[in-house]
Amino acid sequence: MSSYKEHVLASIIMVFPFFPEVFYIGLAVIGASIIDMDHNVNQKNIIIMGLLGVILSLLLYIFQLPYLVGFLIVLMAVLFYISDHRGFMHSILGIIFITGCISLFVLGAYTLLSNYNINVNIILIIILLILGIVILNKKLVPIFGFLIIIGIIFTDIGFNIYYMVLAIFLGCLSHIILDLFTPSGVQLLSPLSSEKFKKLAGLTLLGIWVGCVLASVVLYNNNFFIIKL
């Protein structure tokens, strides 16, 4: 079984060629870490996640913003709570759902905080700190918080919805790829199939990632690719 440190490192490696900015690397780390919330040792964090979704819904409703964003966070928490470890939330459909929920949370929080005319970098720090405290391994939170605060304060990042979504997805995908190399494998197509995929699927996904990195280099050098390297 891969450790949380390995998952964090893998997420950074996978996202860095596309989004080297601290905020998006932080989101990838969050994506890689949230996948294991379906483990029974994380039930306390799942409850906190659900409460966070309820609070966000109430705040968004008060400010007449899309409060369904918060309900999706609650739904995600419920699915994590009832899911078996390495079940649906470890599948392709699962990480797509997780990516959508986290993305909507980030967008909702960003929109809410923007109403107070808070500096963009401060908003990004607040969002990552909230996600980090709820999702990350407690040993990782202090260093994560320190690095993202320093990294975001001293850089001009901005907020790009497409980068955000892709960074979270790549983080989630990096977790799945590592788990594919473990003896127990992953139910990659759950709930459509209970078949467990292992190293071959992991190598295939790694090959696709390498291909995308090489393609981005070629396209970027020819000024066709919008993602910065």
Image: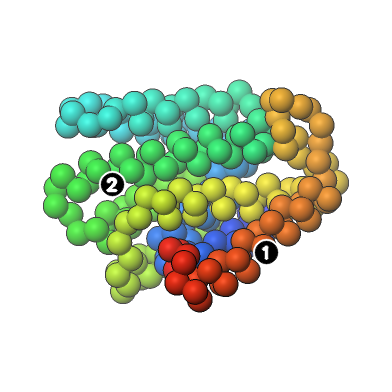
Question: At label 1, which amino acid type do we have?
Answer: Val
Label at residue 38: none
Residue under the image location 43 percent in, 63 percent down: 226
Give the image location of residue 202, x and y in percent.
76, 51
Q: Is residue 184 above or below residue 43?
A: below
Who's the residue at 56% across and 26% down the image?
79
* Location of mark 2 (residue): 110
From the viewer's side, name the closer residue of 79 and 194: 194
Secondary structure type for disc 1: helix
**How busy is the neighbourhood of tag 2: few (under 14 within 10 Å), some, or many (20 plus)?**
some
Q: Going 56% across and 72% down the picture, which residue do you hit?
A: 217
Q: Position of residue 109 (x, y in %)?
A: 30, 42
Residue at x 61% of width, y 23% of height = 82
Q: Judge left or right: residue 72 versus residue 119.
A: right
Measure how far apart labels 1 and 2 are at the Cα level.
32 Å
| Three-letter amino acid code at the position of disc 2 | Tyr
Q: Is residue 34 left or right of residue 52?
A: right
Question: Can you see residue 111?
Answer: yes
Quarter where residue 105 is shown: top left
Q: Is residue 132 visible?
A: no
Badge 1 vs badge 2, beta-carbon distance below 8 Å? no
Tell me the SS state at disc 2. helix
Q: Earlier in the sequence, mark 1 or mark 2?
A: 2
Q: Report the disc number at residue 210.
A: 1
Residue 25: percent from the left, percent from the top? 48, 61
Closer to the camera in the image, 145 or 210 = 210
Q: As drawn, is 41 to the left or to the right of 64?
A: right
Q: From what the image shows, is residue 16 above or below residue 11?
A: below
Question: Where residue 22 appears, x then y in whole percent?
Answer: 42, 65
Above-or-below relation of 77 to 163: above
Q: How is the image coloured?
A: rainbow
Disc 1 residue crowd, few under 14, some 14–19, many 20+, Cα 10 Å: few
